[in-house]
Amino acid sequence: MYEWLDQMGREAKEASRYVAKLSQDEKNAALAAASAALRRDAQAILSANEADMAAAEKKGLSKGLLDRLALTEKRIDAMAEGILAVAALEDPIGEVTGMKTRPNGLIIGQRRVPLGVVGMIYEARPNVTADAFALCFKTGNAVILKGGSDAGHSNKAIVDSISSALENLGIPRGALQLIEDPSREAAAYFMTMNRYVDVLIPRGGRGLIRTVVEKSTIPAIETGTGNCHIFVDETADFDMAIRIILNAKTQRVGVCNACESILIHEKIADAFLPRLGEELKDKGVEIRGDEAVLARISGARAATEEDWGTEYLDYIVSVKTVSGIEEAITHINRYNTGHSEAIITNDYSHSQKFLDEVDAAAVYVNASTRFTDGGEFGLGAEIGISTQKLHARGPMGLTALTTTKYIIYGQGQVRA
Amino acid sequence: MYEWLDQMGREAKEASRYVAKLSQDEKNAALAAASAALRRDAQAILSANEADMAAAEKKGLSKGLLDRLALTEKRIDAMAEGILAVAALEDPIGEVTGMKTRPNGLIIGQRRVPLGVVGMIYEARPNVTADAFALCFKTGNAVILKGGSDAGHSNKAIVDSISSALENLGIPRGALQLIEDPSREAAAYFMTMNRYVDVLIPRGGRGLIRTVVEKSTIPAIETGTGNCHIFVDETADFDMAIRIILNAKTQRVGVCNACESILIHEKIADAFLPRLGEELKDKGVEIRGDEAVLARISGARAATEEDWGTEYLDYIVSVKTVSGIEEAITHINRYNTGHSEAIITNDYSHSQKFLDEVDAAAVYVNASTRFTDGGEFGLGAEIGISTQKLHARGPMGLTALTTTKYIIYGQGQVRA
């Protein structure tokens, strides 16, 4: 039934061997050509996007989603620039580490190599299409993309444009393929193509991530959900705490590294909570708190057990008082999603304890959780933020799209 | 129905927080105590093993399997020594790499930390029980073991012995747990406990590995199946080729890094194949070959398509002539299982091409595939050999049982 998907898989596998052999110069030249193609084909891409936008408006998509879907000349330019920025990054492929001569004379090292075929399933932002291609191609991988159905025409126009550039350079079309069938059945089949696809990266909402974790037989990297906490310790600088909380909660509410829950040391409840409440309400943030919070912040709603585990992605925050750092850490390790967690403190041993014991991809002392990002961490680019522990954890740059293989130079050695 | 398994998961998660906080000295002291306990409890472990052996003989287990199941005082001593050897290894936990100060003053580094809870599913060798515990504990992880049902009494005696040593030191019993229920249903439920278990490592035959890949919602590491090839190039030194092939095929036939398939450059078919045939037959190896092989080795059987993909784990080998390195690499990349592959050559560019283009965990020039092993590679110990590409590839030492977390020291930074 999905013979065409298997065929895609075979072509991707074959193309991956070709792309893996390209030199850095060849890969960068192809990325430059892809970037130029997007600029050249801007009108065709914009027309395709108009069709998507018209359908999306008819369907009644929310304003936020429509904005994410919309392309403009400026946005296409940014995509083209993004591809050049990836080309300019250092290529991790080929580096050999740990090479040593064993007592028997065998020379053994680990060489960094492409993963092979990367699968990406993502939702409505068409710029991810160009981005994912650039990162996968730069690291010598073939990629199969399954974008959101709302962006179907836009994604196809982007892929067609890049593919034409690759074709001119003799690169097999299996290097970049788009699954156009928007059905869940095709997606489900795709997730079982572990014969052809080496890793599956889902980018999107909780439902998508959960489906992939449950259904995929391809090794997958969980990304993105962030129930991020900020713990304000007894010795926190209040001004700093307010600045960081407002940044982490309100600078962009719909992102995975935004703060969703605030923990307050009970000894500063009287001094800090009323001020925190005013500042949050000024920014239009709804507060859901425990009893100590309700007693000190007017207009706050009572938090339910469910609130502690909720990633709002909205102007809502849960606030809880705790008896100290021990309870703060226990609460965080119980309810967090392994993304980003912060303590605001001036206590040295508490800062170390928090860094030691909180189980998350990124743990902060006295800074906003909003920094968890490939660019901010100095990785240059990002294919997603891993919230699991295998292979890659936290912002994933180029290296996350690679693996290693042992290379062994012998002179006839056999095992005794 | 499996509330008791969930309870195990919860206890493991809780214990993992405790074990993660132990210092190197504390972990090594506990490993020493566990080692001493095994020696002290040797008689009880031997009695338990006798019960397993009696049942296994009655069940008609093969001689090979009975030998793997059998414990002796010497083998228990080796287990105890093995735990001490793991204690003596360098502890990877706590190392911070790549720490740097970002332009905004944030200090960011990656700290190596335990995975948390490791799940292991394995077959009949009871020594794996002590081994897996030692490697997981050394790296600060809690572990849940599911051993083969034939070794049930032995595994329980080993775990009881180690647990008593840990209990004396106040270490929670969740640090080491054994699933005693031998049913497939319990195993299937265990594989879906991703809420509690951070990684699942199956060690055993193809059926077990496939089940885990298909059913597990816990991130799993595929290990162990090895359809390993040796390609004898036109310029190979024949003596070296024979020595390496005999070692890789016959030194131990039942292991994953043994050679299962030999590719011969067609130009040396006349000169090399008859000699190869004699040498293999002298060692009692059955040969399954293509037409060129059948014409030159008397007594060889015709290979079927299935043979090229078969890991015999026996005194059988498939032999195929190829037109050159290109065909050899294509054949290997089509039929191999990503384990270990070797070329025997004196051609410089062919050696590099083979290292570049063969897709496997370990790629050799002029050496036996039998070296793919944690000890031989200098890792000190091994929890298995990964034949997949995410997280760890090839022999997995202590580092494969760890992950990283970003730690960030700030001074009040917020994102612009």
Image (cartoon, coloured by chain):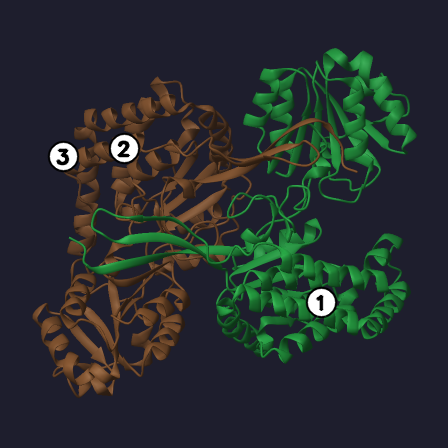
Chain colours: A green, B brown
Q: Can you say which quadrant of the picture contains the N terminus of chain A? A: bottom right
Of circles 1 and 3, which is in front? Answer: 1
Mark 1 and mark 2: span between their CA atoms?
Answer: 56 Å
Of circles 1 and 2, which is in front? Answer: 1
Residue positioned 75% across, 66% down in the render? A149
Q: Residues within 10 Å of mark 1 (few under 14, many from 20)?
A: many
Q: Residues within 10 Å of mark 3 (few under 14, many from 20)?
A: few
Query: Could you tell me the amino acid type at mark 2?
Result: Ile
Give the chain letter at badge 1.
Answer: A
The numbered disc on residue B83 is: 2
Give the chain letter at badge 2.
Answer: B
Q: Nearer the viewer, residue A15 or B219?
A: A15
Write down the residue under mark 1: A35
Disc 2, SS: helix
Residue B297 image-quadrant placement: bottom left
Query: Could you tell me the amino acid type at mark 3?
Result: Glu
Q: Are marks 1 and 3 in contact (CB under 8 Å)?
A: no
Write down the residue under mark 3: B73
| Relative image position of residue A166 (x, y in whole percent) | 63, 75
Disc 3, SS: helix
Residue positioned 41% across, 36% down in the render? B143
Query: Could you tell me the amino acid type at mark 1?
Result: Ser
